Amino acid sequence: MGQYNINLHEAIYSLSDALDLVGVTHIHHGKRVAFMAAECAKRMGWQGKRVDDLFQAAILHDSGVSKTVVHERLAQFEWEQENEHCVLGEQLLQGCPLLAPLAPIVRHHHTHWSALKDMDLPEEIKLSANCIYLVDRVDVLSLAFLMDEDNLLLGRQQIRDKIIAKRGDWFCPELVDVFMEVSSSEAFWLSLENEHIDGYVSVWMSETRQQPMDFAALRSIVRIFSFIVDAKSAFTRQHSDGVARLARYLGTLFELSEDSCEMLELAGLLHDIGKLRQPDTLLEKTECLTPEEYAHIQRHSFDTYAILRNIKGMETITQWAAQHHERSDGSGYPYHLTNSRLSLEARIVAVADVFQALAQKRPYRDSLSPDAIMEMLDEMVSDGKLDREVVRQVAQHPQECWQRATGSEAPPAQ
């Protein structure tokens, strides 16, 4: 099992970038919430790991949100069904040992203080969750104001008044009082502008060095990325898992090293993270895409690269993931690389992506059998689209490839 040197803060930052894509009108929401929560925590006298855990939980508080429609509803100040994404976020973080301590904070980041204060939870968890809830609502109110006005300073008192009105009910009185102190300056509100937030979070990232992680630890982080994107549409659910299993299996058929096979699995899990930018309706469309819609879809592999490129130690994995729509003859996207400029591993991920998509039921067709898939792969080889050697390995093990792509034992009837 390989060892990877990863900066956890960089990975969390990239997760935040991925979540930003879900709410196209609310870019940097997680980072702004983290900034405001940290400023309140420091005024409360919190230090060290307690502030860092709060910052991480704040950045990831909406990790249970994949669908555009859910994000739009959360942008309302009050919404009755807000609890579902809290539960999902908790489940995601619990599956990652390095982030599991943040799970209860995320679980309760929409729980009203009137209920939360009496729950059997550590006081630190309750205050952290409620702090995120308070500043999350501040950011939602800020966005609503900026849609009508250009200057947030004009609306700051209206926002503060709405927070005060929920003191003791939604929000802990002590946290409200601290927020009033912190938000009394113009500098606080001006710091919410994107360039200032980026600078603030960059300093936070620089405070943590790369740390050794084994494959299981890194995979548990990567699984959060893949689950978020696969949950965006019922028709792409488990796609990333299938591509990851198949890519790793193909790597073993080529007798690649264990490290390379692990990296192939991670690239498979991550390859479609850029699809979070795509509207739900586009991914679930049953008709042919219009030229405009196809052009929109074409950006997702580059968005995958843009999200992952900040994580040092994952440069090669990022490259393989971002090149999954490149084609042997150079007709793919986003770089138009030919076979001579594509690594074997990148070509494996490309074939695994096509195979899994054909093996999975989609809105416009049923799952295809191994024989039907091989006919289409052979045609793509003849057209210069997919690598001949990789497809030849698939042809020698079609049933095994189908099982790994789908996670099922029996392929459909011929």
Image (cartoon, rainbow, N blue to C red):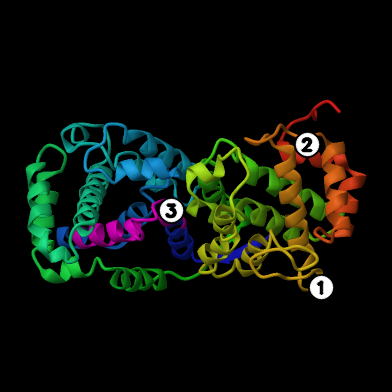
Mark 1 and mark 2 lie on one chain; the one further toward the N terminus is 1
Reply yes or no: does residue 35 show up in magenta.
Answer: yes
> Is 388 on the left-hand or right-hand side of 76?
right
- The residue at which mark 2 appears reads as 403
Q: Residue at x 86, y 48 (%)?
A: 394
Q: Nearer the viewer, residue 71 or 264?
A: 71
Circle 1 residues within 10 Å: few <14, some 14–19, many ≥20: few
- The residue at which mark 3 appears reads as 19
In the depicted structure, whether residue 70 falls above or below residue 142? above
Looking at the picture, which amino acid does disc 1 mark?
Ser
Location of residue 15 in the rendering, given as x and y in whole percent from the top left corner: 46, 56
Residue 340 badge: 1
Looking at the picture, which amino acid does disc 2 mark?
Gln
Q: Nearer the viewer, residue 405 or 106?
A: 405
Image quadrant where residue 152 sits? bottom left
Residue stretch rendered in magenta on the structure: 18-40
